[in-house]
Image (tube, rainbow, N blue to C red):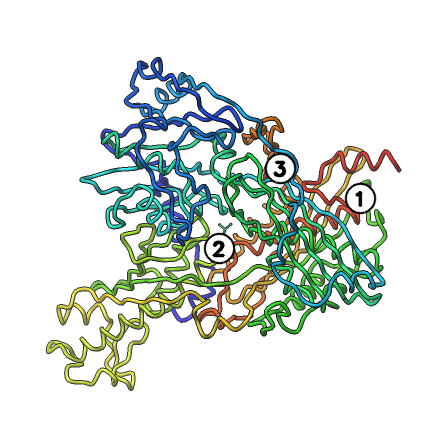
């Protein structure tokens, strides 16, 4: 079994703990004497706090402390050149300025959550409000520098026989993992253990230590389980610093779980985007010019990028291209990464424009993509490590039955229901972050793999067990996985779909180191059956030490007991792919495509996505069960992006109006299409020895434009501003 453990659909090894309630999430942590923190949130969108009257709140039952910018002590701003990551760089409760609606302006600590909540609503804050700018985003006065450029795209566009020039928009989207953000701070003798909801414990630890002004060694961050993140939990947010600092000041453990409403204000969102795409093409469909200009909003004073042009430079072949983006500052909370940041909204624009071009050319949209398939990465002028988009398109079309598509608008019916068929291509980066791993061989015959990375619900426990089983030849049932604690060797963040690819070479290296030490001990120890044999003449196969000819196999656990060696600790590390000779001079990306059927019932104004066929080229899939689960989840998220999700900011003050799960519409089971996922079987050895690239985000890229293409095919209405609203379809219906 072990030899083939990579590629086995192993059920999640942490599944039984999760379904039986034995998996402890951050908010489940309790400590004796623990206080509960509830923040007080600003009710203006911009201005200053004039005064805070907390006398009545302080006198309420169970209240132990109320902190404001006047008594919270000093927190440090990260140096501007710091490589550490935080999206809201200004530390909390350090001044009286309000920059966005809902910003924390005070913190109440009480014995219970109910007492703290009651007291927080009794804190009286007086404001000097200023006018908040939450207007729709506009182009900056200075045109932004291009991200990438080749040829003369404007001249080529002007001369192109067929042109598309359209604007596309995506709304602010709010991350809504079911698990609320939470921090539990426990100080003991000047050292902090911080239980967190984070996708990146190593960064979190360093940021908190720096901002609190304590040595790194005095801070430990623990995230054993995470109930979803989607980028919203990548970098620390202010509640974490509030809990840590309040625990230090109060001298008691502090728990702070933010509310769903705060999730919409204080912990990031995907920025609104406005994007203009200009395509110039020959009558045969070949692109001659591609321009992609995009805008996104940022919080005033912050600088988080929404890199919509991420995939534009290399996805299609074109001699002339320009990609440029600029930010538009608004009085809203900081934006952050959301699943497939940049590329996902960017591909909505690019792939929508490609569909419009296909319509203009009277060309099949699949054929249009095939006609523009590049032979190498024309942006970086390097070869692709492994690109099979062509095969994705052919296979997806075949599985979907695309050949039966009648391109005439509204021509495909199922009774009174109009069917629309659309498709789009997808791409996402593939990189490695540095990683250090320990592989332990224990004298009970078990293997333990350790790393300060975390499982955000995607299956990292399970694939790490598979890696360690593969690297040692020991059955996966004998592997223990220890992650989620910064006391372990530093590992990668769970973001950018990079964790799995980053861990593979480090696990392999740690296992090699452990085996090397084992064979040395086997050769040297007097009690060993291999005593006196040169280590080079020994081998390690399927968990047993043998002579080079394969004879005399002794399972390593037996051997370790026989020689009294206890545990062998192997250390492994691997650099970022940008530092790796195999990876840095090739273009490494994942590819895919989605084929979508929508059902439009004009009589009752009902629009649904019925089925999706997705083909993904992401290299080796370590675990097809957890892998398919990732892609299916991402496709559903894409249905939400196309049809439902939008955060509405009150234009007067920037308050998110629909800041709850009733009014912020997420995709539900009732909206779920039938999803058919296929993975292409091409290992990408440029990135690691198993050829795995990562699959967390690629499944979302391209879903929304495939859906709006299908909506166009059904209705003749081109929706360029997400989400698709029934009003868009009804108004147009009345007009025809
Ligand atoms: Mo992902 S947005 O990198 O968690």
Where is residue 652? Give x, y as percent: 61, 26
Task: Tell me the SS state at disc 1.
Answer: loop
The mark tally for this picture is 3
Q: Residue at x 39, y 42 (%)?
A: 197
CA gap between label 2 and label 1 equals 37 Å
For discs 2 and 3, the disc positioned in front in the rendered view:
3
Q: Which mark is residue 626?
A: 2
Q: Nearer the viewer, residue 676 or 574?
A: 574
Circles 2, 3 touching at the beta carbon (< 8 Å):
no
Task: Tell me the SS state at disc 3.
Answer: loop
State whether label 1 is within 8 Å of ligand 1.
no
Q: Is residue 622 left or right of residue 109?
A: right
N-terminal-most mark, 2 or 1: 2
Residue at the farthest right position: 736
CA gap between label 2 and label 3 equals 29 Å
Circle 1 sits on which residue?
Answer: 717
Q: Residue at x 45, y 26 (%)?
A: 41
Q: Is residue 69 left or right of residue 733?
A: left
Mark 2 closeness class: few <14, some 14–19, many ≥20 residues within 10 Å: many
Residue 662 can be seen in this image: no
Quadrant in the picture for the C terminus: top right
Where is residue 260? Give x, y as percent: 48, 31
N-terminal-most mark, 2 or 3: 2
N-terminal-most mark, 1 or 3: 3
CA gap between label 1 and label 3 equals 20 Å
Q: Quadrant of residue 141?
A: top right
Where is residue 619? Give x, y as percent: 53, 67
Where is residue 327? Give x, y as percent: 59, 46
The answer to whether 219 is drawn above or below residue 503 in the figure is above
Circle 3 sits on which residue?
Answer: 646
Q: Quadrant of residue 351?
A: bottom right
């Amino acid at each position: 079994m072990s030899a083939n453990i990579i590629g086995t659909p192993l059920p999640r090894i942490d599944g039984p703990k999760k379904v039986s309630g034995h998996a402890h999430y951050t908010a489940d942590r309790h400590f004796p004497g623990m206080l509960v923190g509830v923040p007080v949130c600003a009710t203006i969108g911009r201005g200053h706090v004039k005064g805070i009257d907390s006398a009545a709140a302080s006198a309420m039952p169970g209240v132990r402390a109320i902190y404001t910018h006047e008594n919270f002590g000093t927190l440090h701003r990260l140096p501007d050149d710091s490589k550490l990551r935080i999206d809201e760089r200004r530390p909390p409760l350090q001044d009286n300025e309000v920059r966005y609606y809902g910003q924390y302006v005070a913190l109440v600590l009480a014995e219970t959550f109910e007492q703290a909540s009651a007291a927080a609503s009794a804190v009286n804050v007086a404001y000097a409000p200023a006018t908040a700018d939450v207007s729709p985003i506009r182009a900056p006065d200075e045109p932004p520098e291009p991200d990438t450029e080749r040829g003369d795209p404007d001249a080529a566009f002007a001369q192109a026989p067929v042109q598309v020039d359209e604007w596309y928009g995506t709304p602010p989207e709010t991350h809504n993992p079911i698990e609320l953000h939470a921090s539990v701070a426990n100080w003991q003798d000047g050292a902090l253990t911080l239980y967190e909801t984070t996708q990146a414990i190593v960064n979190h630890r360093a940021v908190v230590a720096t901002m609190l002004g304590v040595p790194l060694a005095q801070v430990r961050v623990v995230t054993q389980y995470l109930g979803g993140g989607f980028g919203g939990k990548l970098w620390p947010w202010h509640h974490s610093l509030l809990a840590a600092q309040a625990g230090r000041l109060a001298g008691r453990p502090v728990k702070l779980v933010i509310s769903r409403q705060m999730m919409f204000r204080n912990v990031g969102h995907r920025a609104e985007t406005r994007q203009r795409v200009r395509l110039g093409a020959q009558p045969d469909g070949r692109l001659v010019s591609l321009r992609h200009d995009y805008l996104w909003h940022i919080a005033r004073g912050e600088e988080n990028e929404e890199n919509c042009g991420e995939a534009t430079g290399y996805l299609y072949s074109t001699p002339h291209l320009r990609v440029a983006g600029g930010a538009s500052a608004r009085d809203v909370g900081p934006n952050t990464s959301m699943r497939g940041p940049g590329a996902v909204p960017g591909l909505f624009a690019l792939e929508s424009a490609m569909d419009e071009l296909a319509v203009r050319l009277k060309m099949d949209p699949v054929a249009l993509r095939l006609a523009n398939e590049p032979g190498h990465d024309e942006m970086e002028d390097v070869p692709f490590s492994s690109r099979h988009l062509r095969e994705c398109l052919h296979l997806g079309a075949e599985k979907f039955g695309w050949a039966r598509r009648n391109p005439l608008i509204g021509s495909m019916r199922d009774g009174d229901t109009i069917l629309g068929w659309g498709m789009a291509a997808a791409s996402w980066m593939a990189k490695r972050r540095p990683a250090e791993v320990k592989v332990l061989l224990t004298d009970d015959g078990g293997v333990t793999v350790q790393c300060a990375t975390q499982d955000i619900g995607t299956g990292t426990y399970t694939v790490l067990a598979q890696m360690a089983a593969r690297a040692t030849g020991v059955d996966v049932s004998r592997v223990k996985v220890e992650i989620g604690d910064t006391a372990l060797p530093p590992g990668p963040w769970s973001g950018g779909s990079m964790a799995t690819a980053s861990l593979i070479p480090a696990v392999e290296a740690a296992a090699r180191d452990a085996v090397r030490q084992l064979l040395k001990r086997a050769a040297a120890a007097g009690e060993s059956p291999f005593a006196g044999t040169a280590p080079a003449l020994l081998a390690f196969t399927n968990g047993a030490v043998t002579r080079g000819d394969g004879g005399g196999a002794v399972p390593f656990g037996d051997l370790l007991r026989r020689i009294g060696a206890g545990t062998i600790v192997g250390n492994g590390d691997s650099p970022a792919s940008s530092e790796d000779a195999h990876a840095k001079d090739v273009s490494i990306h994942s590819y895919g495509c989605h084929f979508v059927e929508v059902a439009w019932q004009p009589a009752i104004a009902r629009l649904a996505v019925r089925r999706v066929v997705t083909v993904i080229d992401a290299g080796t899939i370590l675990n097809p069960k957890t892998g398919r689960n990732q892609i299916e989840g991402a496709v559903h998220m894409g249905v939400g992006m196309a049809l439902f999700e939008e955060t509405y900011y009150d234009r007067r003050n920037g308050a998110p109006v629909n800041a709850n799960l009733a009014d912020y519409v997420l995709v539900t089971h009732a909206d779920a299409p039938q999803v058919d996922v296929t993975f292409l079987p091409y290992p990408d050895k440029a990135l690691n020895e198993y050829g795995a690239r990562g699959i967390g985000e690629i499944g979302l890229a391209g879903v929304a434009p495939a859906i709006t293409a299908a909506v166009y095919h059904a209705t003749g209405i081109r929706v360029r501003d997400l989400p698709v609203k029934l009003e868009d379809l009804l108004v147009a219906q009345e007009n025809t």
